Image (cartoon, rainbow, N blue to C red):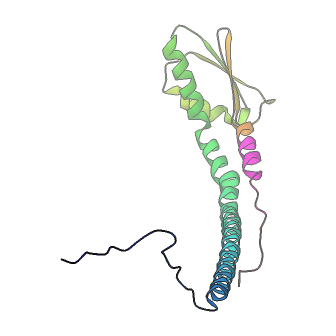
Amino acid sequence: MQKVQLESFDDDTVQEAHTPEGYEQGFAEGYAEGLAAAKSVHATLQQEFVQNIADLEFKYQEVRGELTRSLGPLFDILCNKLFPHLVEEGFASQIAHILLQTAAQNPALEFTLAIHPEQYDAVTSALEASSINVALTSDPELTKNEAWVRCGQDAQHVDLDHMLNDIRLILSAVDFIEMRTTPHG
């Protein structure tokens, strides 16, 4: 019977694999080229990312400018036409509503109402339908859409002209400055 010889793995019996000539140099050159290519791609991606962020920021400013420019005429119509018309049409009914609410809480109270002379007829006709006891006085010192409602020791000031001016002031604070004048090419 034959003896089976097993391979020896001792350090002195293992032969080192022989690397072909130029392998180390080729490996180093390939590694350097790969590293350079990766750095180039990284730099390109980083530049593209920065440019995309800049483009997004620019587009945001452009859209914001377009939006505020397009809202300008709307705000102008609201402040100079619609709101004044609504105040003119609704002043007398608003005063009547305030009086009715206060009278519902305490019907025994007597009211004193001071309004501008131009509003006297409109407020009188709005109050005729209610059964509220109101002493109505004209005060030329008040603005056209201003009133003082006094009830016992309490008083309520209604000044829709001042409110309109506040709305105009707030809406005029919106920045309508055009951020960019030439289209992106």
Residue drawn at x 71%, y 42% is 164
Q: Residue furthest front?
A: 1
Q: Position of residue 104 (x, y in %)?
A: 48, 16
Q: Count the marks: how many?
A: 0
The C terminus appears in which quarter of the rendering?
A: bottom right
Q: In the image, 1: left or right of 41?
A: left
Residue at the limit of the structure toward the bottom, as seen here: 21
**Is residue 6 shown in magenta?**
no
Locate residue 29: give its quadrant. Answer: bottom right
Classify residue 174 by image quadrant: bottom right
Judging depth in this view, the residue of 103 and 62 nearest the camera is 62
Q: Residue furthest left?
A: 1
For the N terminus, which image quadrant?
A: bottom left
Percent x, y for residue 122? 61, 35
Residue at 71% x, 80% y is 184
* x and y, in percent, of residue 146 in the image: 71, 32
Task: Say above or below: 100 vs 41.
Answer: above
Residue 10: where, in percent of width, then height? 46, 68
Q: Write the start and end of the magenta stretch as one range.
A: 164-177
Q: Is residue 148 left or right of residue 5?
A: right
Left/right placement of residue 5 relative to residue 94 reads left
- Given the current orientation, which residue lies at the most extreme right position? 141
The residue depicted at 71 percent of the width and 38 percent of the height is 163
User: Relative to the observer, which residue lies in front, 73 or 83?
Assistant: 73
